[in-house]
Amino acid sequence: MCGRFGLSRPEKLKLERFGIIALPEETHPRFNIAPGTDVLVVRERKGEREAITLRWGLVPWWADDVAVGARMANARSDTAFTKPAFRDPMRQRRCLIPADVFYEWQAIPGERRKQPYAVGLRSREPFALGGIWDFWRPKEGGEGIATFAILTTEPNVLLSPIHDRMPVIVPADRFLTWLDARTPEPEVKELVQPFPSELMEAWFISPRVNKADEDDAGLLEPEAPASPRAEQLELG
């Protein structure tokens, strides 16, 4: 799954890769982005690509209550083409979520607490998570809301000791293919495979990341493992 991520250096984004020319004026570094918040997303509408903020937690257009978004921060890519909540967005409303780190929590044998990891590219360059979006409006009328979910896939070799899922990372040279609603389904499915582990790294970080209101650069600093048991599971 993907429950938290960050975009600590938005100024490093290569906008031409996304097919956009500018970011929203309010874009600023974020180190601990949580579901339920407004997040920078790139999408394509009517053939035009745009960078906007959408609420994290997908609410299908047909939902009775916006509260369902709290349960739909993630969508499994292996079932997204068939599940009613995700199948239309998966075919027609895909998006990219710029990031440069995401967080995963590893269970520690014999303990209730979990060991948090930061995960990113070895190059420390930004990347893009694959997502889907939808627009919901109350049946009684009134203002609607655009929301999104992050797709997940099987973990690669790096992530498998930490968690049984990882977010979909779309290769930079396929950004526009991903955004294009005309891309055939088989080609889309090729893009939701686990990202190559040799291009990624993971490191222990502070349990401060567990609190969504902690949002500073110090969260990315490497730390000793929270437990000797976690150290035994450290990745090589």
Image (tube, helix red, strand yellow):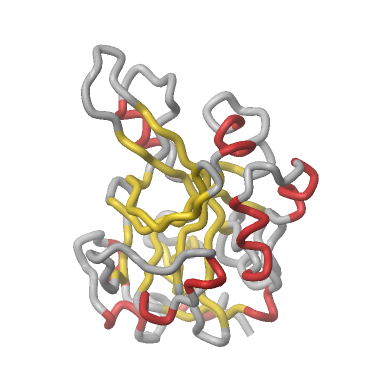
Q: Which of 100 and 182 is in front in this view?
A: 182
Q: Where on the picture, by quarter, is residue 103?
A: bottom left
Q: In which quarter of the image is residue 159?
A: bottom right
**Drawn side of residue 77 relative to residue 116, left or right:** right
Name the residue nearer the viewer: 166 or 112. 166
* Residue 81 position (above or below residue 132): above
Residue nearer the viewer, 231 or 35? 35
Q: Residue at x 71, y 56 (%)?
A: 191
Answer left or right for 13 relative to 40: right
Q: In this view, does 172 lie above or below 147?
A: below
The spot of residue 107 in percent (x, y) is 49, 61
Question: Which quarter of the picture shows residue 186?
Answer: top right
Residue 224 versus residue 200: which sits nearer the camera?
200
Please state the horizontal and vertical placement of residue 128, each as a whole percent of the image: 53, 65
Q: Is residue 224 above or below residue 207?
A: below
Q: State the count of labels.
A: 0
> Can you give x and y, in whole percent of width and height, for residue 206 in the image?
32, 76
- Relative side of 19 to 225, left or right: right
Tell me what residue is drawn at x 59 percent, y 37 percent: 92
Which residue is located at x 39 percent, y 59 percent?
Answer: 4
Specify the quadrant that holds the C terminus. Answer: bottom right
Image x and y of residue 167, in percent: 56, 57
Residue visible at 56% across and 65% down in the picture = 162
